[in-house]
Every structure is written in C-alpha cells, then in structure tokens.
Amino acid sequence: MKKLLLFVFVLVQLVCRAEYDSTYVLSVTQKYAIPEDVSNGDYVGTWMKTWTWQSVGTISYSIEQNFNSAFSIDSSSGLITITDSTKIDGKVVQQDTLINLIIRTTDSGEGYELDTARIWVKENAYCKFVDLDASSSGTGTRTSPYNDMDNIGSGTAWNVGLGYFLKRGTSESAESTTIRAHFASTAHPTIIGAYGQGAMPSFNGAGAGAQAQCFFFGNSADRYNGRCEYIYMYDIEIRNYAWQAINAYKDSKNMGFYNIYMHNNNKDTGGESNLVVSTASYADILQYDPYEFINCQFDTAGINVTSGASHIKIGTSPVTVTNCRFGISNGDCLRLADGSHGGKVKHCTFDNGIESVSYGYYNNSQCRMHNSVYEDCRFFNAATGIMMTSPTDEYYIHPDYVTIKNCYFYGQGYASIFMNKNVSADNVSVGHVYEDNLLKTKGYGIRYKDSQDLIIRRNSIVGMGTLATDGIINADADVNTDIYYNVIYGFVTNGINLTVGSGAEVYNNTVDGAISLSGTTETVRNNFFKSLTGAANYDHNLDVDDISTANYFTDYANKDYRLKSTATLAIDGGLDLDLTPDIQGTSVGDSPDIGAYEYVPGSVTVTITASDANASETGPDSGTFTVSRGAVTSGNLTVNYAKSGSTTSADYTQSLTGSVTISNGSSTATVTITPVDDATDEGDETVVLTLTSGTGYTVGSPSTATVTIADNDGYQNPVAHWMFEQNGDDASGNGHNLTLYGTPSYVTGADGYGISLNGSALYADCSTVDLGSQFTITGWYKFTGTTQRTLAANSTWQTPNGFWLYMYTPSGQFRFKTGNGSSTLEATSTTGHHTDGTWIHFAVVVNKATGTCNFYVNGVNRSNSSPIRTDFVTNSTILLGRTTDNQAKLYGNLDDVRIYDYQLAGSDISDIYNLLKSARVTTGAFNQVDSDITVFPVPCIDFLTINGSKEIRQIVLVNLLGQPVLEQNNTAGTSNIKVNTSTLKSGYYVLKLIDHSGKITSKSIVKK
C-alpha cells in the first residue's frame, strides 16, 4: 500500500527534499505472523515509529482500519494483540491468509501518518507449536506442543510452507538448528514465529561452543541443491552465541527477518558477522537473491575484539533493510558485501559506540554493493558513517551508483562518507549521489577517490574539533565531480580540497573556510569562501572576509547563512548556470544569487485543481492537475505536493516526484496522470494531490484535488452459466438456456438449488457453444456410485470427435478425453477426488492450441497428465449428464456449471470455489437466504430488493476476489430494503446479510 499522508497540523514529505529533514517519515509498513489457533490477549507484535523520526510531541498509536474488530493496539507501546480470537480461530480456510490493518501513528506536535500492518496467518493444519519450557514433548499442536527444536528435526526435516511457532516467554540454551534443501514459495512461505503472550522466545548460545550457530540455512557442501527459499522469521531473540547467530548460506534467497532482536553474538571469536547472509565471491554478484529486514535490532554489551565482527554481513542482492537499529558493534554494523541489484537501507539508526580515527574497523556501514540507496538514516560514533570500498582479494566490485540522501551523520572519527578504492585494479566508481544530508564530523566530511560523475549537493557539512581537517576532499584521479549548493564550515584546513582530477564543477556553495583546487576544474563560480587557491578558471565568487557578514547573512555567528535583503553583491550576483533548486529547495531563476541560499523577497499563493478530473484505463485517457500561482509569472517556482488516494505508482506511467515547477513567464504548471491499462480488476481508483509548504509561496485554497481513474477490467462473465435455481436459464445473458430432458427435479445444491439428473433419461442440452481454442469448464457435482459419469460432453464416449469430461469414480479421477474421430488423447487428474454423496467442485482449464489441460478440485490444482489433441471440435452442441451417444450417464446432481471462453487462472478458480463455498445456503429455498427473507430479482440489473429485512443491520456485496464492492447499513431496521446495483459491473457476487448479533447469511447474486 502506498503511504497515505494526512495533515493535522503540518506534516511535510518532500520527495525532492532540500537540506536534512528529521521528520521525514513517521511510520512504515511492518510485517507480523500468527497462527490461526489464537487466544484473546495473544501478542501479534509491536508497531514502531521509525527510528529516525525525531519526535516533537507525544507519539501514540491507534488502529484506523481493523479486521472484524479482532485486533487492538496499545496506544503508548504499539503492542498489537488479539481481542476477539473467534474472528480468526476456525475462520481461516486456506493455508495462508494475509490480513492488513491500517495503523495510525500520531505525533501530537506534528501530525499523523497511516500505514499497513501486514499479518500473515497460517491455517491450523499447517502449524507446529513449540514450548521451549515444557517438561515433555507433545505432538506439535498448541495444546500439546513440542518442547525442543529437535522435535521438529534438522536438515530436510522441516516441511515447506508450514508455520513453526515458538511460545513467548520461553527460552532454550545452546540450540543449533540446520535447515537445508528447503524450497517454500511466495504463496506458502515457511514461517518461524512466536505465539502467546510475553517476551520473545529466546535462544541463549551460552555453552554452545566456539563455532556454534543458532540457525544455519543451506548446505555448504552443496550450495545450490541445499539452498533455502521463502523462509520468514518473526519475533525471535538470539543472544550470546560465540559465532554467528544466523547463517544463510550461498544461493539461499527470498528470506525475511522481522522484529528480530540479536544481542551479544559473535562477540568473542571475531568471526565475520553476527548474522551472515550468502557471502560470496565476485562471480556470484549478478545473482538475484532477495532478502528483507524490518524492525530488527542488533547490539553488543561492549567492544571485545579487534578483528571486526559486524552485526550483518550480506553478500547477495537485492536487500532491503528498513527501520532497524544497529547498536554497539565489534566491527561494521551493516556490511553490504557485494551484489549488483542494490541495497535499500531506509529509516535505520546506527551507533557503533566508538569514534575510531582508523577506517579499517567500526564503520556504521560498509557498502560494496552496486546500485545501493541509504535514505533517511542516522549514523553515530564510528570510524566512518558509510564506507564504500572493495575487498582486497576480489577486484572490480567497487560499487557504482550509490545514493546517500537525507541522512544524519554525527561523531565519525575518520569520515562521515568515505569512498575508498581499495586496490589500484578496482574499477572507477561511477554515478554516486550524496544529497540533502547533515554531516557533523570529527574527521573528514566526505572523502572520495577514483570516482566519475559524482554529485555532492545540498548538504550541510560541519567540522567538530581539531581533527576535522576537510569538509570535502578527494585523493585520486576523479573525473567530472559536481559540488553545488552545500554549506560547509568548521574545518581546520579546507572546506573543499580537490587535490587531483579533472572536470570538476564547484558552484553555489557557502564555504566558511578555504577552497583549495590544485586539481583541474572546469567551473568555480557563485561561491562564498574565505580563501580560494589553485583554481585555473573562476569568477562570480565572494570572499567572506571582504564583506560585512552582518549585512549578508541572517545570523553569521550562529552559522545561519541565509541571505538578507542587504546582501547586495550576492543577490542576483551569480552567473546563470541553468541551476537546480538551492539547498532549501528554492527555485533558481536566470539571475542566481551567490552561495547555497537563494534570497526570497516575498511569497505568492498557490492553488491546485483537477482541470481534467476523469482519467480512464481505456485509451488510456489521461487526467490533469493544474497548479496556479495567480497573476505572478516571474521566475521559476517549485511547488511541493503530497500524493495520496487509492492508487499505487503501478497504476500510472508518471513518476510523481513530489514537486512541480512553474516556469518563468508562466502562471501555471500541470501534472498529468496517464493510467496503465492493466488486467487487474481493481475498481475505480483515485490520485489525490495535496499542496504542501515550501519556499517562495504559501498554500491557498483549494489545496487538494482528485483525479479518478476509471477501471476497465471488470469481471469477465462466462459465456454460459447455469445456476439451476428451478430452471435451466443461462445467467450469463448470452442466451444459452438449457433444454432439459426427462423432467429433472431440483434439489438442495452447493448454493441454493441444484439440478438432479438422477435417472436414465435425464440430461441437459446446452445447444451450440463456441469454446474457441482456450476455455474453462467449472461446476459442482454430487452422486453415489462406482461407474464413470459424464459431466459435460460434445461427442461420443469411445472415439469422440470432440471432448468428453467425466469422473472415473473407481479411482476418483477426473478425465478429459479428446478425439478427432479416429484417434484420441486423454488427460487425467490425480486420484482420490470422489466422495459419495458430497458436493465437489471441479474445473478443467483447456488450451487446445498447445494440447494441454489442467484439473482443479475444490480450488486446488490436481493435474496428473495433461496432453490432449489439438484438432478436436469445440463448436458444437454440449450436453450435461451424458455423451451424445447416450452413454456414461451422470445419475447424480449438478450445480453452478460455467463455461468460459478463456483460461481461468488458478487463483480465479480458487476464488470461485471459496466464495461459493462460503455462500452456501442450507434452506434451498429459491431466492431466499433465510426463512423470513426474500431477495429478488436474481439476476438483477439496477436494483436488488431484500424483503423481510427487519433484523438485518448491514448489507455487503463481495466480488469474486473477496473484496467488498458495495456496503449499505440498515440501522433503522427497515423491513424492505432496495439496494442500488446500477454502478456495479456485470458479474458474479455474494450478498452477505449481517444481523444485529453479527450472524452472517450469504446468497450468490448475478448482476447483468
């Protein structure tokens, strides 16, 4: 879910920020896992504000959007607990279910944000429970848990796709668990989590041995075949392991760690890491092996070794590290060891606890990973904040394209940011960007060597103490460095010191100190400095010693270098270099000022409207926002905005940057929204832009506008659909009404009524239905017996010139036989899918062009062999209940038979099965959901009437994806309710009626 920003007072998020902003993001999406078998009071996990948010008031938490009121959150601690277990326990009908809660995080002095708590729920049949303090071992259920990890087993004994839940408040010593050759999936990951109440389950490595590891994922002897995939770990504490707490070996991937706490691990032996992931060689860096860390914490009681054991070392990519805390470390807190797909480190805080002047150890973070981003992080007390380097024994992985933005650095002994080419054979590091950071260093601010196209912009760089020599310094043959709109002061030697290199451009910096440029430069312009030496070509600069600082700067003594109106030589005194916004985000016109700040004499009022409020996926047809500054037209003006609404960035082609610039000479600027014509049925969605504060303007009214994107991906009706509600009518509206032979009767069906073809002369004629080359047939059947029974056929049974879909009862096997009149091929499902007297849902998905088909039973793929012919007839009369030569009669019941002229996805079939299963009506009364309630007409067009609804308090219509699409309350207890369905797309829905006690009654509905 995209972040929704709401403003109570002023909460500003600038995508293109300027200067460091300590209140950038208040909360982020967070992840948890629970078993279906929960009790009231059980902990889910703790919701956290970001570690980097600097509170200006009291932080509190609340649930903005709950799940059936099943959860609550402590307003002070953020602890999420179960308050109504009946809404979860016994209600999960599939292996894995994702519940999303919308959490509101409030700073009473600033405002609030909404974000998502994603709770993974494992169905009870797929859960194993462990009570580490139990006196004896049970069977692995919650009432009879295991008492040791060894009860689960090791190596390949862990079953994929299960949830292994450890009881909170328990602990185990010297545990060592190995999991290998474990290939779970995105849909059904393996979970290692916690259940119950109290502290995290804890593993204590005391006594485990010098080389002990708490968890080892993978196989060092066979890295590929022994790898692990899709394992997620939640709410576990690991402490006091002399070696690694967790080791995920090479080729393991798609693993996540959430709310993990690691303390005092790898402290005494000096190994490579507390948590080590897939450390590999240069040959492995192109592999795509994702990892994720959210809300994890790492620390050590004290510094014991000098060999540099870090908290995390990860040698694969991509990796996402979000809202984690890294405390005292024996080495680098976080090492992005290598990889090409990037590390994304956001909202994390680092504090090594030591301000070493040597960069070999004790760095907040080491980066050897290409395409990495550090954003909104805080770095304290280390040798370096971020050190970008390469291993001494592997050449050519000096990282390219590293971005460091909106980060705070404090107390580094050597350098806040250090790009260090380790050996001469390393590649030149290309495309780094360091922007909008605040650096307070005891050594160098930014030191780099062997870079190309480096950009250093809009940073505040402050030296602290006598060892703070240079704000920005290079040390090798750097090419095309751009340094602009930085404020630099407090350094003993130089604010900027470029000793070698070529093509550097240094402009619009405020340097309260020396600029030394012995290397070749192209442009040195529009800067403040105290001395400038070595530059071959420079102009339009000002020496701070030659001006009255009181007339030029807002508060020179306190380092506020914003220009005053009396800064006569500085205002409009720069040379036009087609400049970007200044350090505060102020747009720069044709006559830029000197220094990092552009003087703003006054302010204009800006507004926003949706000049074209209606966009559509069809076409696609774009929508347009217009931002206006009234009659003012002079100068470029950058206006900031925040995006909200129900869309994500995947719904439109533009990159909404968070700002739009009104160009000089114009009073307006536009933001265009061009929809992506996707295939997702998501309903109409909105893009909401809200103007936010910035430099050079005030926000007027209207400050918010909305563009609506019309969806064109409604549910595609089947070409034929027979519900058998006391007739053979085609509910699809395509006119394929059944001709019924032998006067069949109607019985209680899988949903409402079904049809009984339980006789030798009973069958249904569908007439000709053109299936094309790809089609799907679904339905429900029920009968008793041991012979082969026809479900649908358009040909004879023995040598068909068409197809024959039937159940072979002796083996409980669905079969799909195809023929061209002379030869046949038959595809089959797996066996064991027939139970006498039980409604069973079937589906066959056919691709005639490729000669394949797949079977689904009760929503699950049960295919065995799939080859079929590619030349069988698909445009002829279809019969239900027998073949065209009167063989293999059904002698049973059918319900809700559908034919689609395309291939349904497995998820669609599962949705149809689960939705109809949950909507079954036990009364069997036509168009009734309760003995006193009548619903009509079915199918409906514009309105649906519910008679006898006095006890009904809420009406909900749900689509095939399980999403509510219409809700209507009946708090007054009206006995006759009319529901307007005119805006709904044609398709199949479930009507849910909820009475005053919370009881839900359901009925399937077709909307034409």
Image (cartoon, helix red, strand yellow):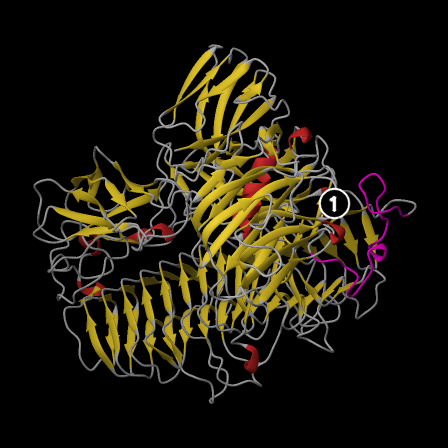
Relative to 836, does residue 660 appear above or below in the rendering? below
Relative to 546, does residue 169 appear above or below in the rendering? above
Relative to 871, does residue 838 appear above or below in the rendering? above
Which residues, given as a range, are shown in magenta? 137-160
Question: Between residues 462 and 723, which one lies in front from this camera angle?
Answer: 723
Residue 171 position in % (x across, y down): 81, 49
Residue 881 position in % (x across, y down): 60, 43
**Per the image, is 143 magenta?**
yes
Disc 1 target residue: 125
Residue 51 position in % (x across, y down): 52, 48
Residue 904 visible to the viewer = no
Question: Between residues 498 and 69, which one lies in front from this camera angle?
Answer: 69
Name the secondary structure under disc 1: helix
Q: Is residue 112 left or right of residue 561?
A: right
| Quadrant including the C terminus | top left
Question: Between residues 82 and 736, which one lies in front from this camera angle?
Answer: 736
All told, the count of numbered labels is: 1
Looking at this rendering, what residue extends furthest in the right direction?
Answer: 136
Quadrant in which residue 169 is drawn: top right
**Per the image, is 901 magenta?**
no
| Quadrant including the N terminus | top left
The residue carrying pointer 1 sits among few (fewer than 14), some (14 to 19) or many (20 or more) residues within 10 Å by Cα, namely: some
Residue 867 position in % (x across, y down): 58, 66
Quadrant in which residue 528 is drawn: bottom left
Q: Residue at x 48, y 34 (%)?
A: 989
Question: Between residues 589 and 219, which one lies in front from this camera angle?
Answer: 219
Q: Is residue 573 left or right of residue 332?
A: left
Q: Is residue 283 left or right of residue 837?
A: left
Residue 775 visible to the viewer = yes
For badge 1, the amino acid type reads: Ala
Magenta segment, prevailing SS (helix, strand or loop): loop
Quadrant in which residue 371 is drawn: bottom left
